[in-house]
Amino acid sequence: MPVKVSVKNIFKIFGMEPHRGLELLKNGRSKEDIFEETGQTVGVEDASFDVEEGQIFVVMGLSGSGKSTLVRMINGLIEPSAGQIIIDGDDVASCSPARLRDIRRNKVSMVFQHFALFPHKTVAENVAFGLKIKGMPAEERRRRAMEALAQVGLESRADSYPDELSGGMQQRVGLARGLAAEPEILLMDEPFSALDPLIRRDMQEELLELQRTLKKTIIFITHDLNEALILGNQIAIMRNGRFVQTGTAEEIVANPANDYVAAFTQDIDRSRVFTADSVAGPADAVQLSTDTAKNAIERMEAAGSDAIYVLDGERIAGAVTYRDLTALMRDNGGALASALITDFPSARRSTPLFELYSLAQSGLPIAVTNRKGRLDGVIAPQAVFAKLAGEAAAA
């Protein structure tokens, strides 16, 4: 996918002499030394990343890490001290005020932590407010507002007032307001952090569902690693203004870059981070029409496995176990079909690990299937349990 947002070596120094602070920082001085010597505060230090079109890029960090400063620089609300922020070829860090306004109006929308709804305006009027500022006619504003509200499931509350809605509904209105402008890029600054945990989880799921349809480019700011792992195609972890690790959820949990990241990930529910793909092995199988029980036993002994899948052409016919085949050989040396288990566990590569737990308890290897239902890999039950326990051998 093409890169939609490219941030290159961005710095932000707060104070009257940012260039002095920047020079000291580039010479290896610490944030603390710079503040003590000059009174300048380092907000963001040498941040670089690319966000592909249609991707959710999550920036995670605790309070004071610089994440909100970063997202405001992307929107041009805060001017960087150095670096580039390229959006579709335009450098937000150095473009003219007129061009910046145009980018804000037509490419980027922002959704804030606090809903910032006008209490005296209806839900539809709140959603359409940005369109009104653009000078859009009333009829068109109303149509666009209703479409955005329908996307977040609030079309029926268009004429209600904010104080008549729950917190989760109010945040949906804030999201609809961002969507009404039909932006290519959504900047979301801790939009769900003020919500109760259950409502927050609902909003996360709703955002992911919307994203499957809308495929917006989203930069999402959060202080919650669980939220980052749920939402992010790519995740950047910030500390003291710097990125300490960038990667997928699986990469960050499996291989934390340092003790700081490891401390965050140690209590993470691994079963909701890793997928079947992380524990799948090769699609070893025998053919129903040409292989014998003897062949299948030899293949299992070579692989150190106690079961193997049987294919009928490209279709999965079932599985056979070492125990059943050895018994079959003692009795009459019959065909594989005589010992075939047709009720076998299966999953897709994208299936989260927690859904494999019950499948692994069957004792049979789990068949990993592709979109056509064909065998694409095999998961040994012990690999699931090892991955859940965090054992490197399960990788």
Image: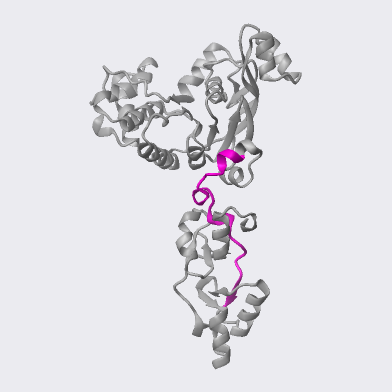
The residue drawn where x is 52% and y is 44% is 268
Can residue 376 be seen by looking at this rendering? no
Q: How many marks?
A: 0
Measuring from the top left, give residue 18's x and y in whole percent: 65, 11
Tell me, what colour scheme is on the image?
A: one colour
- Seen at 59% across and 76% down, the residue is 286
> Which residues are the magenta region?
262-287
Pinpoint residue 358: horizontal percent, then vertical percent: 45, 62
Return the x and y of residue 313 as percentages of the image width and height.
Answer: 55, 74
Residue nearer the viewer, 191 or 264: 264
Query: Relative to residue 352, is residue 233 depicted above or below?
Result: above
Along the line of sight, the residue nearer the viewer: 212 or 81: 81
Side of 320 relative to 34 (left or right) = left
The spot of residue 15 in percent (x, y) is 61, 9
Viewer-side residue, 355 vs 51: 355
Tell me the quadrant of the picture where the C terminus can be found: bottom right
Instruction: Tell me the residue at 33%/33% (across/down).
Output: 168
